[in-house]
Image (tube, helix red, strand yellow):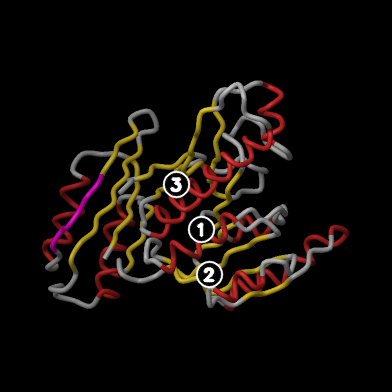
Amino acid sequence: MILKFACPDQRGLVARVTSFLAEHGANILDMAQFTDQLAGWFFLRIHFDASRLDLAPEDLHDRFAGLARGLAAEWRLRPAARLMPTVILVTRERHCLQDLLARCASGELPISIRAVVSNHEQLQPVVERAGCPFVFLPVDPAARPASFEPYRTVFEECAAELVVLARFMQILPPALCRDYAGRIINIHHSFLPAFAGANPYRQAFRRGVKIIGATSHYVTEDLDAGPIIEQEVLRVEHYHTPEDLVRLGRDCERIALSRAVRYHSAGRVLIHGNKTVVFRD
């Protein structure tokens, strides 16, 4: 099982959590911790063998809740081998989608793709060839909140614990962002916070940048301003054209998004305010 745990920092936290697990028969396989001394906040991830627990996992959950409550902790306990139910949103561009589909098929990503939803139909053959359900849901710019109610329905029907915007070129309504806070991951084709918004590669070209990149972050009500999970960069040479920057940038997008999805679905990301702690593998 995997335990994610964060709380105000104090002495003895590691001892209290690990002692609790040991007392109930858990064997710790891997552990990572970090204390943010500026924020006064403690972060912990434990991967443990639960095969010899002296009580059922649901009972372990209930008993640990008492310990966590006394420490004012934010936490989550889940089976390590369970694939995270995921919905992917796309528009027309396929590079991030195809990369996620391939990595999922090869077992690189611990997710189960329950549906791929798009406001266009171009990528339906790509999705169906991969054996995933495709759902076409158009978005009416004049009635945006209403257009996204069917999206919410798909999320609920799929029991989605993760929503991935794989170059989904639409802004989600604030209510959806709030209700799925910490569960929607976006890829922005720019090294945020620089060059936010449309056409970042042309903005970067005009500025004469020497590096470009992509940023994967959680979606919030503030556009392109959510907690950052992963970033990837490449060097720009003087002879690169705007088209070259787009080509290089797509590689950055694939890598940053797939890493963010893997870290999140493996329980390696802890959110605190507008920042994240990522225990990389």
Q: Earlier in the sequence, mark 3 or mark 1?
A: 1
**Lower sequence index among marks 3 and 2:** 2
The reply to whether callout 3 and callout 2 are in contact (CB within 8 Å) is no
Q: Amino acid type of disc 2?
A: Ala
Amino acid beneath label 1: Asp
Q: Residues within 10 Å of mark 2 (few under 14, many from 20)?
A: many
Real-space Cα separation, disc 3 to disc 2, in angstroms: 19 Å
Q: Which residue is mark 1?
A: 99
Q: Residue at left 63%, top 62%?
A: 89
- The amino acid type, in three-letter code, at marker 3 is Ile
Which mark lies nearer to you, 3 or 2? 2
Q: Quadrant of the N terminus?
A: bottom left
Report x, y in % for residue 128: 59, 76
Q: Is residue 73 left or right of residue 49?
A: right
Residues in magenta, as a range: 27-32
Q: Main secondary structure of the magenta part?
A: strand
Name the residue that disc number 3 marks: 271
Q: Position of residue 211 (x, y in %)?
A: 54, 27
Q: Give the SS element for disc 3.
A: strand
**Residue position marked by numbered label 2 in the rendering:** 160
- Determine the residue positioned at 56% across, 23% down: 210
Front in this rendered view, residue 163 or 249: 249
Say which residue appears at 61% left-offset and 23% top-offset: 209
Q: Name the element at disc 1.
A: helix
